[in-house]
Image: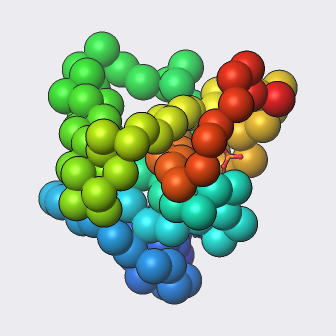
Amino acid sequence: MSEDLFEKIIAREIPAEIVYETETVLAFRDINPQAPTHILIIPKEKIRTINDISDHQTGLIGELYLAARDIAKQAGFADEGYRVVMNCGEAAGQAVWHIHLHLLAGRALTWPPG
Ligand code: 5GP
């Protein structure tokens, strides 16, 4: 059995609304959306936090951003604007220990975030 929640989603052991998939990346809608569009973009390879990213994984990390770009273009909010953010560690609010970009769009997003 897979050990973390997102590994279970990758393995289709628990359901998710998948919106994008490549050999290395998966994106699906957040179960508790914080904006009209809230998508999580994850590497299929497990990396616990930003602190655990290896130097050889720059390509994979770049692919997460290319996924955000492509999803934004396809969904039609690329020009309007959107936010891409990754929490690292408990103080930043990370709750799932498998890195994920949050892609948020569809409303005015304030800065700084809380
Ligand atoms: P974090 O707080 O770690 O940056 O973000 C974790 C995100 O995962 C949260 O936005 C939360 O709503 C989302 N999440 C937690 N459990 C599930 C689930 O079972 N399915 C989906 N699609 N999202 C989840």
Q: Is residue 86 above or below residue 70?
A: above
- Name the residue nearer the viewer: 87 or 110: 110
Q: In which quarter of the image is ligand 1?
A: bottom right
17 is higher (above) or lower (below) than 77: below
How many numbered dots are placed on residues in this image? Answer: 0
Residue 46 makes an appearance in the image: no
Which quadrant is the C terminus positioned in? top right
Observer-nearest of 9 and 33: 33
Depth check, front residue: 46 or 23: 23
Look at the picture and state if 47 lies above or below 13: above
x and y, in percent, of residue 58 in the image: 25, 22
Residue 14 spot, x, y in % from top left: 54, 83
Which residue occupies 46% across, 40% down? 82
Q: Which residue lies furthest to the top in this view?
A: 55
Towards the viewer: 81 or 64? 81
Q: Which residue is drawn at 64% across and 37% down?
A: 109
Q: Position of 2 compared to 88: left or right?
A: left
The residue at the point 66 percent across, 63 percent down is 33
| Whether residue 91 is visible | yes
Horizontal and vertical percent for residue 15?
51, 85
Q: Is 12 left or right of 112, judged from the image as shown? A: left
Q: Which colour scheme is used?
A: rainbow
Residue shown at 48%/72% (left/top)? Answer: 9
Tell me residue 53's x, y (percent): 42, 24
